[in-house]
Image (tube, grey):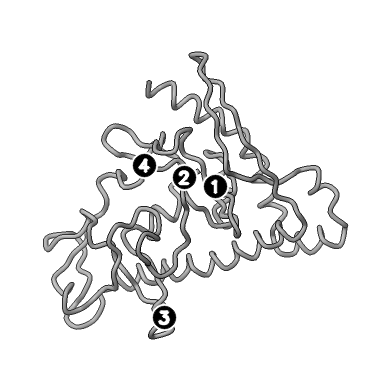
Amino acid sequence: MPDTTQQTAPAENALPMFYTSPRPLDRSKDGNLRLSRPTHFNFTAKTNAIPLLVDEFPMAAAYYPIVFAAGPMPIPAAVVGLKNDNNLFLDSQGRWQNGAYLPAYVRRYPFILMDDPEQKQFVLCIDEKSDMFSDKGEYPLFEGDEPSGFTKSAMEFCAALRQQGDATDEFVKALKEYNLLMPNDAQIDTRDGSKLQLSGFLVIDPKKFDELPDNVLLEWKRKGWLGLVYAQLLSSHRWQNLVDLLQVKK
C-alpha cells in the first residue's frame, strides 16, 4: 500500500500524495493565474490506493475494496490497483473509468488546506506544478484584490473535507479502541495463473464486530457508524473488479 500522508503542513520528503510543490495561494504571485478543469488524472497514475473519508464509504464500496492503510492512525483508502504504482481505473489517456466514483481526495487536487504553524490557522494552498494552472485557464483565482468565487468555493470544499477528516479520525479511533482492525494480506490469483501479494493494510474483523456489546452498537447506530462498517465489509467483493481490470489492460 502507498504512503497516504494526511493533509498537514508540507515538510521536506513528507508531501501529501499527488502534491509535488504545494504553497499558499498568494495574491501578489497568482493575481493573473487561472485554472482549467482537468483533462486527465495522470497525477494519480502511480498509486494503488487513495484516501477516503467516512462520508464516501457507501459510494466507494460500489467500485473499490475499502481498506485501512496500516500505521499509528490507520487511514481508510479505496484500492484502485493491484500493484503499488499502477492505478487500474485510468485509461491510456488518463481518464477515470466512466461511471466509477471519483474520491474527494482526487477531486480536491490541485488545492489543499494546510496548517500554518506561525499563524496558527489553515491556509489554502495550490500545487503550483499542476498543469491545470495557466494565465489562460477557465477560472480566475482572483477578481481584483479578492479571491474569486471559484477560489472561495475551493476553500469551502477543502474546509468541508477537513471537517469530514475529523469525523473519519473519530471513527478509526473507535475501531482501534475495540480492536476491530485486523491485518488482511491478500493473495490475488489472476486469470493467467500468476499471483499478486498485497500487504500492509487492515480490514474490519467481522467476528469481533459481531461481539460488540449492545450499548456500543446502539451508540454506533446513533453516530451512523454501522453503515460504514457494513460498507467496508461488503466492499471486499470488489477485489474481483480489480482482477478484471488488470486482465483487460494486459
- Total numbered labels placed on residues in the image: 4
Gap in angstroms between the C-alphas marked 2 and 3: 34 Å
Between marks 1 and 3 in the image, the one whose residue lies nearer the viewer: 3
Q: Residues at badges 2 and 3 in contact (C-beta under 8 Å)?
A: no
Q: In the current view of this chain or complex, which residue is farthest to the top?
A: 192
Residue marked by disc 2: 101
Could you classify mark 3 by the number of other residues whose Cα lies within 10 Å: few (under 14), some (14-19), or many (20 or more)? few
Q: Residues at badges 3 and 4 in contact (C-beta under 8 Å)?
A: no
Residue flagged by tag 4: what amino acid is it? Lys
Quadrant, the C terminus: top left
Between marks 4 and 2 in the image, the one whose residue lies nearer the viewer: 4
Nearer the N terminus, badge 4 or badge 2? 4
Regarding mark 1 in the picture, which secondary structure is present there? helix
Q: Residues at badges 1 and 3 in contact (C-beta under 8 Å)?
A: no
When the figure is inspected, residue 60 is found, relative to residue 243, above or below; the finding is below
> Which residue is rendered at x = 34% and y = 57% of the image?
109
Regarding mark 3 in the picture, which secondary structure is present there? loop
Gap in angstroms between the C-alphas marked 3 and 4: 30 Å
Q: Which mark is residue 59?
A: 1
Q: Position of residue 53 (x, y in %)?
A: 54, 57
Regarding mark 4 in the picture, which secondary structure is present there? loop
**In the rendered view, does 50 fall on the left or right side of 155?**
right
